[in-house]
Amino acid sequence: QSALTQPPSASGSPGQSVTISCTGTSSDVGGYNYVSWYQQHPGQAPKLMIYEVNKRPSGVPDRFSGSKSGNTASLTVSGLQAEDEADYYCSSFASRSLVFGGGTKLTVL
Amino acid sequence: EVQLVESGGGLVEPGGSLRLSCAASGFTFTTAWMIWVRQAPGQGLEWVGRIKSKADGGTADYATPLNGRFTISRDDSRNTLDLQMDSLKNEDTAVYYCTWQKGGNPYSWGQGTLVTVSS
């Protein structure tokens, strides 16, 4: 199963919005509404930010939102804050596996 | 509160074996699908494999590149998940995370355990 495609980097100034894309195929992203997004700060375990394309777990700010169109899912972070600077990974359920994106380093300028 | 606590990591020589364990609490383990994910130093996340609940067959699927070297098992009586790793290679060096699958993907994560394969 090939990895999902994410841009290696993204950036924005405090208060701005940034969107990170995650492109797969009809066998993963496009075939299921099971896309998740994770935030990972250095030295820490990944933290779930979005699941099932656009649902937020309890405690995740509503500045984080997810969407999907065809084979591409997106994570939007609105009102950027310094603490949002981290690596972000997408993942998608596939029939007998799970695939991750390569990760996007989000920099808050 | 969901808790996943991995153990068993350490230093092992190439060709050796290691068994990781994950103690789960705070959710109904018997009905949970569980996933192992790993992350090599400075690299991204990589799916290792998944085991279904007994009610859903209890079978496991693995990442193709592992070529049958890893085996996932579960003990529902003790709420534990294991990862048996054989014929270890240098490239298996990584932090290994135990996760609870919900909505098709990892929902809750442990803190990870480091496996270093080196002579």
Image (cartoon, helix red, strand yellow):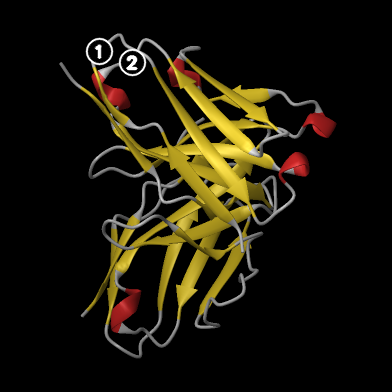
Up-down relation of residue A34 to residue B55 (above or below):
below
The quarter of the picture where the C terminus of chain B appears is top left
Mark 1 Cα shell of 10 Å, populated few (<14), some (14-19), many (≥20): some
Compare marks 2 and 1 and give the one earlier in the sequence. 1
Q: Secondary structure at mark 2?
A: loop
Up-down relation of residue A109 to residue A54 (above or below):
below
Residue at the bottom extreme? A15
**Residue A91 x, y percent position in the rendering:** 52, 49
Q: Secondary structure at mark 1?
A: loop
Q: Nearer the viewer, residue B78 or A11?
A: B78
| Residue appearing at x 61%, y 36% in the figure | B80
| Residue appearing at x 52%, y 30% in the figure | A1
Up-down relation of residue A59 to residue B20 (above or below):
below
Q: Is residue B49 visible?
A: yes
Q: Is residue A29 visible?
A: no
**Dot label at residue B88:** 2
**Residue B102 x, y percent position in the rendering:** 68, 51
Find residue A67 and report its image quarter: bottom right
Up-down relation of residue A71 to residue A73 (above or below):
above
Residue at the front extreme? B78
Could you tell me the amino acid type at mark 2? Leu
**Residue A89 x, y percent position in the rendering:** 42, 55
| Residue appearing at x 68%, y 33% in the figure | A95
Q: Nearer the viewer, residue A72 or B89?
A: B89
Q: Decide if residue A52 is on the left or right side of residue A38.
A: right
Contact, mark 2 vs mark 1 (Cβ under 8 Å): yes
| Residue appearing at x 37%, y 46% in the figure | A102
Letter of the chain that mark 1 sits on in the rendering: B
